[in-house]
Image (spheres, rainbow, N blue to C red):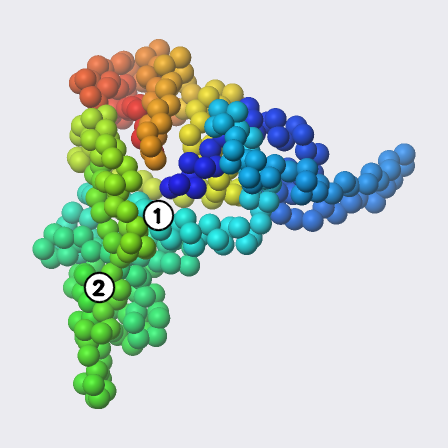
Amino acid sequence: MEANDETRHSNVAFDQVNANLPPYSFIYRQLAIPLIPHKPTGNLHMETIRVVKKADMVAPESWLEQKPEEALTLPSRYFFDDKIFHSECDRIFMSAWHVIGHKSELSKPGQFVMTDIFDQSVIAACGADGVVHAFHNVCQHRGNRLVEERRDTQIGVFRCAYHSWCYGLDGNLRHAPRSDRVKGFDAGNCNIPAVRVEEMGGFYYFNLDPDAPSMSELFPGADAEMKRVFPNLDDYRLLEEKDVVVAANWKVIMDNSIEGYHFSLSGPCHVDLADLIDFDGYKLTQRDKWWTYAAPANKLATSAYGDVLRHWAEGDAGGGGGWRSRVGQCRVARVLR
């Protein structure tokens, strides 16, 4: 989370630093591929490609000393250097809290959600007692993955397809064929390592670092704010999940996520969403390590993603209003990330 705070910068500053570098620098750092010159034809000629020297970039020490409101972007290598990326994976993502899913997805015994994060895979399952457990998605015998489904309901035990080792909904070993023939075999030593799991704002999260601060320590007030904005959040249900893979460094995506003013400027990418928002009231609020960004709904909108809207219906003070459409209620409310 700290790295996310350190990499924030204004879009204007990002454009400034891009303007100071030749175009190919920007392409290289995004795609990380060598440039292959085309064979000259006719009156065309090949131009020499200038190499951007380290001295041309913003030094890390200088970058850290900048005022946030006047800051330039990180040095370009932070967006394409594999060593930096692998270091980020270990030092940031392996100690961060990752969302599992809404509590309704793990409300009944046997329900589970599987999440992959880089080379790690975690299962979160609701036990017979209603307690949610998280553990690694790996059999302790030969390292086989136990499940491939993103979410499902497990009846009984998780059975490894390789040698039929069986695990309970808490990740503890229940049965291992022929283990009675192994001298000194102790099933208690073969339980799947547990993973920390916490609930906040109606969602479950996991963390692979046993020593990482809790979510309540990292994000004080976030749970209450989420429930204030969405008072019925606990009653929500998952309708659909879509994964969107973007060919860009994760820091580019993080910067994009805390911006909203590009919605109405980026053509067809956000035209449907932009039509539903009153950008004059858009507000981004920074807390210590978490943010909220909100905007009133555009009550003059006549359609939402192709669905004709009938009329605006006022809601309660906390939940806001929504449009009534022929397929139900379409709600545009404040968003918390």
Element on which disc 2 rests: loop
Marking on residue 159: none
Give the labeled residue for mark 1: 96
**Which residue is at 56% across, 26% downward?**
13
Q: Which residue is found at the position 48% from the left and 37% from the top?
A: 7
Instruction: Say which label, 1 or 2, has the lower sequence index.
Output: 1
Q: How many labels does the image show?
A: 2
207 or 217: which is nearer to us? 217
In the picture, measured across the screen, residue 172 lies left or right of residue 150, that is left
> For mark 2, what is the residue?
171
Q: Residue furthest top?
A: 300
Specify the farthest residue to the right.
43
Circle 1 sits in a helix, a strand or a loop, which is it? Answer: loop
Q: In terms of depth relative to the viewer, which is nearer, 70 or 306?
A: 70
Residue 275 in picture, x, y percent from top left: 41, 18
Badge 2 amino acid = Gly
The quarter holding residue 320 reads top left
Residue 162, image x, y percentages: 32, 74
Vertical comparison of 221 with 192: above or below? above
Q: Residue at 32% of width from left, 12% of height from top?
A: 299
Crowdedness of circle 2 by 10 Å Cα count: few (<14), some, many (20+)? many
Q: Which amino acid does label 1 sit on?
A: Ala
x and y percentages locating residue 102 in the rendered image: 24, 42
Q: Where does the N terminus fall, quadrant-wise?
A: top left
Where residue 51 sits, quadrant-wise, is top right
Location of residue 73 by image quarter = top right
Query: Between marks 1 and 2, how big is the CA–CA gap?
Result: 22 Å
| In the displayed structure image, the side of residue 83 where residue 45 appears, left or right | right
In this view, the residue farthest toward the left is 129
